[in-house]
Amino acid sequence: MHRTVVYELAKYLAMKKNYEITILQPSRRHRFAKKTYSKFIHGDIETIYFPSFFPLNISYTVPLFHKEIEILCKLLSKLKCEIIQACDYEYLTSIAPIFAKRRYGIPIIITSDSLTGYSWFYGNTTIDAAAKLYTYSIGKWILNSYDRVVFLYRKASEEVKKFGVSPDKVFTIPNGVNLENFKSQSDVGKLRAELSIKQDERVLLFVGRLATVKRVEILIALTKSLLEEGFRVKTVIVGDGPRREYYETLSRSIKNNVIFIGHVPRNQVYKYYLIADVFVLPSFSEGLPTVLLEASVAGKPSVASNVNGVSDIIVHEETGYLVERSDINSYNRYVKLLLTDENLRKRMGKKAAEYVKENFNWDVITEKYEQVYQQVVNV
């Protein structure tokens, strides 16, 4: 469950007027603070921070357990809390609600993106080995300790049963996509001009963290191949990360055709989807990638690795193309199909937008969460 999506779910639940919501969130800013810091993010939704560590170059959270448990228990003593919704079993922050459940008898639900070290990989042998060990030990205990377990895509919901989690406890509820940004009319021509993209040049887009697992080198090699075959293309790479310098070096021979944008605020990324012709996601591993949902809503066909939840978003040969992880040559074949056939590109883009709007609508998703909440409250 992408952290920004926690706020989206909270916002849509709060809009129904049936919920009072408090978000307890890890933060490095208040690591040694004696008092917690809180703010209101949407109407009556309050966010309270507890101190945590974030190891360099690893997307992982290590909380100060005693502070997290202390703050959580104070909240539960003060508020008439009926449900605790946790996020991501692979984070140690998900342990505190288990102790709270034992003390207060409050039902707990956890939403996770994937099974790390089992079917989702970081791309580093050491980290992936540690993640696998974690999932088979602490992770298994965490998942079995929760009253309900929600995964974002179908494959993970099936896989988790191999860890002893009762099928009756497991649900598949995807993340939604915020449609509001895509309703505004961005000046596509202005952005293309700023990036020196000529009218007859087609745009390949990648959005994501520049890390090993994303395999951006495949996209760079694809761009080189297309240029050698005479295609007029520019590849736009949005995002930052530990591999950025390596990728910039790798694309030096075609530096005029590969544009590294760097970090872009979430509420501004949509502009880049709108200038794209094809979205490319060659990752070695993914959960349920929000970037594919956003590209689809923007009406763009995608070519992406067929891993984990990607096939829940892309309908092969209808809304885009799925490529098996080892079949690197198919990126070239499918992207060329889309670049050479404008009608195909537009037809797939339109179907992609329709499919995502229908199946990843926040109103539908919120209703599914409500059904799960009702189950645990009524037990």
Image (cartoon, helix red, strand yellow):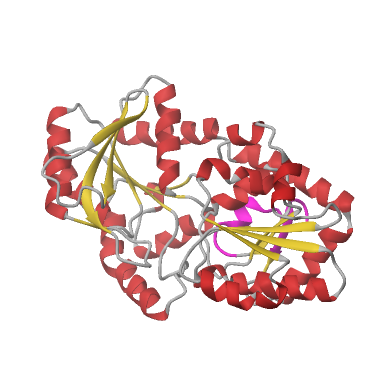
Q: Quadrant of the C terminus?
A: top left
Total labels: the figure holds 0
Report the residue that reaches farthest toward the bottom: 125
Residue 321 falls inside the magenta stretch: yes
Residue 115, position in %: x, y? 42, 63
Q: Tell me the residue at 53%/50% (across/down).
A: 264
* Residue 165 lies within the magenta run: no
Residue placed furthest toward the top: 17
Residue at position x 69%, y 50% in the image: 194
Residue in front for this viewpoint, 142 or 8: 8
Residue 267 spot, x, y in % from top left:
53, 40
Q: Looking at the image, which is closer to me, 344 or 224?
A: 224
Q: Is residue 176 visible?
A: no
- Relative to 254, residue 95 above or below: above
**Relative horizontal placement of residue 41, taking residue 332 as reference (left or right):** left
How far across and down, in percent of the image, does residue 226 sit? 80, 71
Viewed as shown, does residue 104 lie left or right of 93? Answer: left
In the picture provided, is 246 more to the left or to the right than 84?
Answer: right
Decide which of 93, 47 is in the foreground and name it: 47
The percent coordinates of residue 372 (x first, y second) are 39, 37
Residue nearer the viewer, 112 or 157: 112
Residue 25 appears anywhere in the view: yes
Image quadrant of residue 195?
bottom right
Q: Which residues are magenta?
A: 307-322
Residue at 36 percent across and 64 percent down: it is 163
Above or below, 264 relative to 119: above
